[in-house]
Amino acid sequence: MSETTEPMIRLENVSRVFPAHGEAEKVRALRKVSLSVPKGARIAIRGESGSGKSTLLNLVGGLDAPTKGRVVVGGHELSEFTERELTRYRATTVGFVMQAFNLLPALSARENVELALEAAGAPRAAGRERADELLGTVGIAERAEHRPARLSGGEQQRVAIARALANRPSVLLADEPTGNLDRKSRRAVTTLLRELSEKTGTTLLIVTHDPNTVAACDTVYRLHHGRFTGEPMAVNPSRRADSAREIEEADDQDTSDSSDDDE
Amino acid sequence: MTIATRVWRNVARGRARTLGVAVAVGIALSAFLILSQINTGIGASVASAEAALQDVITVQSAGASTFSFNTHMNGSAASKVATAPYVTSVQRILIEAPGANFSGGMPSGGSPPSGSANFTLYQGIDTDTSAGIGLFGGFGGESSFTITAGRDLDAADENSQVALVGSSYASDHSLVPGSPISVNGTTFQVVGLYSTGSMFGGGAIIMPYPAAQAAFAASGPNLLYVLVGAASDLSAAVQDLRTILGSSYDVTAPSEDAGGGFASALGSVLSSTQFEADAALAVGAAIMVVVMALVSAQRTREIGVMKAIGFGNSRVLAQLLSEGILLSAFGLPIGLLATVWIGPSVAQIVASSATPSGGPGGFRGGGFFTARLLGRVSFAITPEVLVLGIAVAVGFGILGSLYPIMKALRSRPAEALRHE
Ligand SMILES: Nc1ncnc2c1ncn2[C@@H]1O[C@H](COP(=O)(O)OP(=O)(O)O)[C@@H](O)[C@H]1O
Ligand SMILES: [Mg+2]
């Protein structure tokens, strides 16, 4: 990817401070974070709990707004969007996969996917067809009529991935997508995310603890107390399995390691 | 998938929630409907009673109660009243209830004795009183008085031994027009059956005054209803009658009787039911707000999800408001059924708590009439009631859901998604 091309995602000195609220003190979840993600890149973001990973993803997804700094996606600065444009952005430019799946419990798998198509204004008849196609792509076509409560975690996350990809977003955001899954489903979902992003050219930003998921990406960033630490690490495509092991081992040593967190 | 489908799915999914909200709405709704129907019914009654009583004077033996059936007036008093100034007509009323025990008249504050079950009420009444005061006998003035078989009594019956029989009494005793009936040993002929919506009327036997007086060998009527030509003559007429009759008779104008009178009794019921209906509405709204706040806490996350996948505030609002209204609408049938079922009992409670005891000199029928009117309040589901019920249910639905939804919508999706 050439240096002159506008990156798909660009964060410039982004800070997010959650103001004090009752008993809770104010939290600096992100501190002057900058990041540049080329189109089609697959980025993993690691970091201990509370380091600001979800906050970062929410900012990119237009679900939250920074206290300071700029978030630019696909050439548009999100803070300049009107409410209507922001709604449209959430519907079409980004897809979101969350740890808790967040499917609507009253709706079937198919209807959950259709909902995303409806949000983007797709005609109803076409929506149903496309929803079934998407469920086929994620490998659960036969579960289309089932409600979330009757699906396993892995199946629910597949539905969530189908939903996130429904409107062919340029950016797929995944917040610990394998965090609630068993080992087998973790692998399947990781593979699915990787394959789909390869096939569609979607830029992938995954927050994860899962070494296998990390290793499925191309570049790994590490957040610590709201800042990126160290240099981004490139994953060797021919040695993904080894990378996963190395990351796991590094994690074990990491526990005592900490950078200064002064502002 | 339409918004209506999703609304229905969400409401149908939370069965316990839907039932809970429906019951809460139903209770609040029926409380409101019952009280407002009592209120409306009484409002109309107060107006008509006040109008009807404007030119009415009652005369009884001093210290007597309306229900002291033994205190007959002197027969000559009635004729003196008829020739007094301002008086345009006099209706003599004889009330006999052999076997009934009303020592001291109406139990204070209580409801009237419950009719034909324990005793038979006989009424002698002037049949040629075209003005038709008839508050007691159900003659003329009583709107729900209807002849169900045979004919009404008329002026020509004055000296005949004929009777009208309440339809409930008639069916209990297999009486039809033409049947003979024994009144204190004298045989009368039934000429018609009648019904009223009231407690006494349906079971009473009504005869022309002279025949009834003879049958019971009564010295005179228990009560006179006196009509004066114009409401403006009322005070003067009362003064004159007091002078003519002296201290052995009580002369009262119900419309001027502020203490414990008929109209004022109704007036107090009116204002208290108005207050209670308003309170029911407020309590219902409060219940709805609390219930919906609890319900929407669970749904904050869903609101976050919908917004995260690209639904605008207006679409989320439309869906959740519709859900709130539908949820509340489930309370409508419960509220309407409860209104029909428990409305009459509530009217009884209101009647017994609101009826005055009828102190000396007051219009002693007050409590009785109040109770009768409450007994007549209809709790049927008329189109008006249905519309009112729907309006209140929809109002509850909107009121209950608006605040929690707005709160969830104002926060950013990221925040809503953090909600457990
Ligand atoms: N809406 C919020 N209000 C207050 N504090 C928040 C909010 N969201 C996140 N935080 C705080 O910001 C910090 C970073 O949170 P988060 O980005 O969720 O961390 P991670 O995803 O890395 O576990 C945490 O201390 C968290 O408690
Ligand atoms: Mg997180």
Image: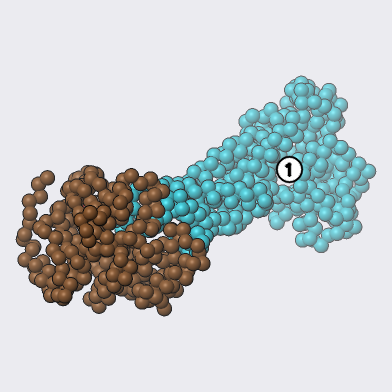
Chain colours: A brown, B cyan
Q: Secondary structure at mark 1?
A: loop
* Residue B401 in view of the camera: no
Residue sitting at 11 percent across and 56 percent down?
A: A229
Residue corresponding to mark 1 = B69
In the image, what residue type sits under mark 1? Phe
Q: Residue A117 location, x and y as percent? A: 43, 62
Image quarter for residue A89?
Answer: bottom left
* Residue A227 in view of the camera: yes
Residue sitting at 24 percent across and 67 percent down?
A: A179
Q: Is residue A1 left or right of residue B378?
A: left
Vertical side of B363 occupied by A67: above or below: below
The quarter of the image holding the C terminus of chain B is bottom left
Residue in front for this viewpoint, B42 or A142? A142
Image quarter for residue B110?
Answer: top right
Q: Residue A188 location, x and y as percent? A: 27, 76
Residue in front for this viewpoint, A20 or B340? A20
Subunit of mark 1?
B
Residue in front for this viewpoint, B217 or B309? B309
Q: Is residue B211 left or right of residue B52?
A: right
Residue extending farthest to the right is B156
Residue sitting at 82 percent across and 38 percent down?
A: B132
Residue in front for this viewpoint, B180 or B379? B379
Image quarter for residue B237?
Answer: top right
Q: Is residue B410 left or right of residue A233?
A: right
Q: Is residue B203 left or right of residue A174?
A: right
